[in-house]
Image (cartoon, rainbow, N blue to C red):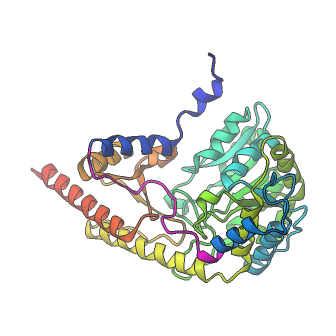
Amino acid sequence: MRFSRRLDMIGVYLFSALGQKVRELRAKGLDVISLGIGDPDNPTPDHIVLEMIRALIDPNDKDRHRYGSDWPSDVFPRAVAHYYRQRFGVDLDPQNEVLTLIGSKEGIAHIAFAFIDDGDVALVPAPGYPVYSTAAIMAGGEPYFMPLRPENSWLPNLEIIPEDVLKRAKLLWLNYPNNPTAAVAPLEFFERAVNFAMEHDLLLCHDAAYVDITYDGYIAPSVLQVPGAKECAVEFFSLSKPYNMTGWRIAAAVGNPQAIRALRTIKDNIDSGVMRPIQFAAAKALTSSQDCVREIVKIYQRRRDLVISAFRELGWDIEPPKGSLYVWARIPDGYGTSMEFASMLLYEAHVAVTPGCGYGEYGEGYFRISLTYPDELIEEAMRRIVRAIKRKSKKNKR
């Protein structure tokens, strides 16, 4: 049996490896709290679930059981267009500028196959969501990592990308609010990025998975709010996080019609679309009252404040993030690498966090905590973390 070389190049998915370590310790009877994965713990709001049930049993929809791509409903693309008009003031053509995805991760992976040939480059933020780089590799290309640094507010410096790299580049990836750094980007940055993409003939791909998970009155923009952005940009909008719908697997790619058509061609040859009742339920989510999203955000903001308060008890100077489901923090001095720090918390505090090195070399020195766990678990996890670090500090002083 001979495997493809791609498997050697991409390795084991970060969160699969993390989950395996947690399972091994739990199998030994240890009470491990995982704060590693950004998967909402609260249920999908009732009105969305009820719409799913209605669509499942609707006797008038004779096609509800069929392939979602062969018998799609136009209700979801129209709902996405409605959402973008209401939320961002952006007009979209539901037929040509909106494409239904089986979750944004699928679209993010597949768009590389529509643009990347052997030797081509995808410009990828680092640290960043691993799929941006692995998709480029699987398509036969290579990622060029753009460092995100705190001194630049975790924004990439596009001007320092080498000219020889730009000549081979096809895609430019951005993601704000950001995973894992929780950074946000102003509309002015998107304006610069759009101009940069136009100048260098790039498709700008913006992963907007957390655009509605924002705090303290901050409202995140869409890249499509930039005048002319649809000439060079697509945005990946997901219902997973704002509506607690990760397992439903529905999202949309929106923007440049040529890119949307290319991605549709890839998908037509690979998958069979999203089940129709899920499309109806997602449309209900986007066109109904958004009070449920505001309530979900309140929960995450409360949890964010719990984490920040615990770190400040340790004397850490940490700024509360304005967006995303995460807190990104620098590991304290004296703990070696981010993996060594995460291992210490796992084996001494029985708390799993994500080491920054899992997002590449530019994530080294940091770790990520997810807010998608019940308040009481986060409170207990933070008590354990504080105790473990204080205990370690006392030992180091002896």
Residue 91 horizontal/vertical position (percent): 85, 74
Does residue 146 appear in the picture of this structure? Answer: yes
Residue 370 location in percent, x, y? 45, 60
Quick check: 365 above or below 385?
Answer: above
Q: Quadrant of residue 115?
A: top right
Q: Position of residue 309 (x, y in %)?
A: 33, 73
Residue 40 shown in magenta: yes
Give the residues drawn in magenta, as a range.
29-47
Residue 223 shows in this picture:
no
User: Residue drawn at (80%, 76%), measured in percent from left and top?
Assistant: 82
Q: Residue at x 42, y 41 (%)?
A: 20
- Residue at 61% x, 64% y is 245
> Which quadrant is home to the N terminus?
top right
Of all residues, the one furthest to the front in this rendering is: 59
Could you tell whether 60 is left or right of 144 in the image?
right
Quadrant assignment, res 74 = bottom right
Whole-percent x and y of residue 19? 43, 45
Magenta stretch: dominant secondary structure: loop
**397 on left or right of 224:** left
Q: Is residue 303 magenta?
A: no
